[in-house]
Amino acid sequence: MKSQIETLKRDIEIHKEVEKELAKRSHFCQKVIKRLKDDVKELEAERKGVGYTSANKEMRNSQDHMQKLNKKN
């Protein structure tokens, strides 16, 4: 009975770790999708001759910089 309880506790810990990893991957994929959507919008705007505002590009660069700083900490 004790060994079964220990096995179940280990299984729970493994499932928790897997859940955390999947959440990280999901978050990463959502960021990639958002980035790609922004890229598509930018390309479509350039193709139409409207151009993409420099403010949007600056905001994106700032966000990238902040994410890099957060990863270091």
Image (cartoon, rainbow, N blue to C red):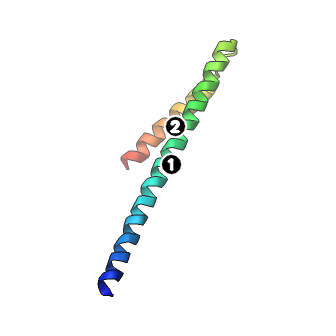
Mark 2 to mark 1 CA distance (whole Å): 10 Å
Residue labelled with disc 1: 26
Front position in the image: 46 or 23: 23
Q: Where 37 sits versus 14, above or below?
A: above
Residue 66 rendering spot, x and y as whole percentages: 47, 41
Residue, far bottom: 1
Nearer to us in this view, 40 or 63? 40
Tag 1 or tag 2, which sits nearer the N-term? 1
Residue farthest toward the left in the current orientation of the protein? 3
Q: Nearer the viewer, residue 35 or 66?
A: 35
Callout 2: SS? helix
Q: Position of residue 7 (x, y in %)?
A: 33, 76
The residue sitting at 51% across, 42% down in the picture is 29
Q: Secondary structure at mark 1?
A: helix
With respect to residue 33, does 18 lie above or below?
below
For the point 46% across and 53% down, the residue is 22
Q: Amino acid at mark 1?
A: Ser
Residue at 42% x, 43% y: name it: 69
Near mark 1 (Cα within 10 A), the count class, few <14, some 14-19 or many ≥20, is: few
**Circle 2 residues within 10 Å: few <14, some 14–19, many ≥20:** few
Which label sits on residue 15?
none
Q: Is residue 31 left or right of residue 44?
A: left
50 w.r.t. 71: above or below = above
Q: Describe residue 60's horizontal placement relative to residue 24 as left or right.
A: right
> 70 left or right of 30?
left
User: Which quarter of the image is occupied by the N terminus?
Assistant: bottom left
Q: Quadrant of residue 43?
A: top right
Q: Position of residue 26 (x, y in %)?
A: 50, 48
Q: Which residue is mark 2?
A: 32
The type of residue carrying mark 2 is Val
